[in-house]
Image (tube, helix red, strand yellow):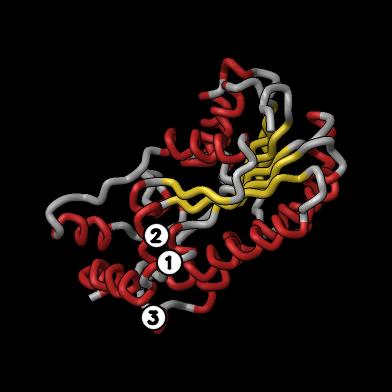
């Protein structure tokens, strides 16, 4: 799908990968509606997109708020005239604790943002996307969506749900103008811990005790790969050497892959 002169909606547009998707779409000549709960983050995105004045609108809302999301298409169409693509990038993680120590309200919050946010946005925009001559819907899952990570059970469950939801949507969209893509990032150098309200001190200490910090993909590179996957109509794409390796390993030997990650996370969880 071509990008120039098309209109895209991007969740998580106030920081990290979502912001990079917004900025790079604008750089390629698109019009963008950036969505985020964080109004200050959206304002920073606007400041960074000075050259794209007039082609960017911002919409501050919680993707878990179904009523607000269902009203969003009208606002976007009023501003841009149409919607050609949707990028569901917004997501949060949980505190790095085992399931038995994880409060129910935290589990519900993670599932609300990561899974129901994707469902809400997809349902709200599907009729408009299907009405276009060509359109795209891209959902960001995670390496944690196909490989269990101890200390991130609720996060992984939410991203696994996004994976299967997106793949089913792909199957249901055959014979329509809609191209559907699911993305599996590995480690990306974003500020997701702070944005999720998670204390990163245990994670930093665990990384320091290992001798070196794990290699991560930059948000800029991740954003480029996300857009490229959408542009070529990919069914799925992994981002980062870690995600590509573990994707293959988990298919070949799921138990060994699970135990490898469990061993790596052991010092973090205690």
Label 1 vs 3, first from the N-terminus: 3
Q: Residue 101 has which mark?
A: 3
Identify the residue shown where x is 57% and y is 48%: 89
Q: Please, what secondary structure does the residue beneath circle 1 have?
A: helix
Q: Is residue 36 visible?
A: no
In the picture, measured across the screen, residue 11 lies left or right of residue 245, that is right
In contact (CB < 8 Å): disc 1 and disc 3: no
The CA distance from mark 2 to mark 3 is 31 Å
Q: Please, what secondary structure does the residue beneath circle 2 have?
A: helix
Label 2 vs 3, first from the N-terminus: 3
CA neighbours of label 1 inside 10 A, class few (<14), some (14 to 19), many (20+): few
Rendered location of residue 185, percent (x, y):
45, 50
Rendered location of residue 122, percent (x, y):
73, 54
Q: Residue 59 has which mark?
A: none
- Residue 56, picture quadrant: top right
Identify the residue shown where x is 55% and y is 28%: 23
Q: Residue 251 has which mark?
A: 1
Q: Nearer the viewer, residue 126 or 38?
A: 126
Instruction: State the residue position of label 2.
Output: 248
The CA distance from mark 1 to mark 2 is 5 Å
């Amino acid at each position: 799908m071509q990008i120039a002169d098309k209109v895209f909606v991007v969740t998580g547009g106030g920081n990290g990968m979502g912001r990079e998707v917004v900025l790079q779409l604008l750089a390629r000549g698109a019009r963008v509606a950036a969505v985020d709960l964080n109004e200050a983050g959206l304002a920073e995105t606007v400041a960074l997109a000075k050259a794209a004045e007039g082609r960017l609108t911002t919409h501050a809302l919680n993707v878990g708020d179904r009523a607000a999301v269902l009203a969003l298409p009208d606002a976007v169409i009023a501003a841009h005239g149409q919607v050609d693509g949707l990028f569901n990038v917004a997501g949060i993680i949980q505190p790095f604790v085992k399931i038995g120590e994880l409060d129910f309200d935290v589990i519900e919050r993670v599932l609300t943002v990561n899974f129901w946010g994707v469902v809400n946005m997809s349902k709200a925009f599907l009729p408009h996307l299907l009405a276009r001559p060509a359109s795209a819907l891209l959902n960001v899952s995670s390496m944690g969506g196909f490989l269990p990570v101890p200390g991130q059970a609720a996060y992984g469950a939410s991203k696994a749900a996004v994976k299967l939801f997106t793949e089913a949507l792909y199957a249901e969209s055959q014979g329509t103008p809609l191209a559907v893509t699911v993305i599996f990032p590995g480690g990306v150098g974003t500020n997701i811990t702070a944005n999720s309200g998670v204390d990163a001190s245990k994670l930093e200490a665990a990384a320091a005790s290992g001798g070196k910090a794990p290699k991560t993909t930059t948000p800029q590179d991740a954003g480029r790969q996300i857009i490229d996957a959408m542009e070529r109509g990919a069914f799925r794409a992994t981002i980062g050497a870690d995600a590509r390796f573990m994707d293959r390993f988990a298919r070949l030997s799921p138990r060994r892959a699970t135990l490898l990650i469990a061993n790596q996370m052991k010092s973090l969880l205690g």
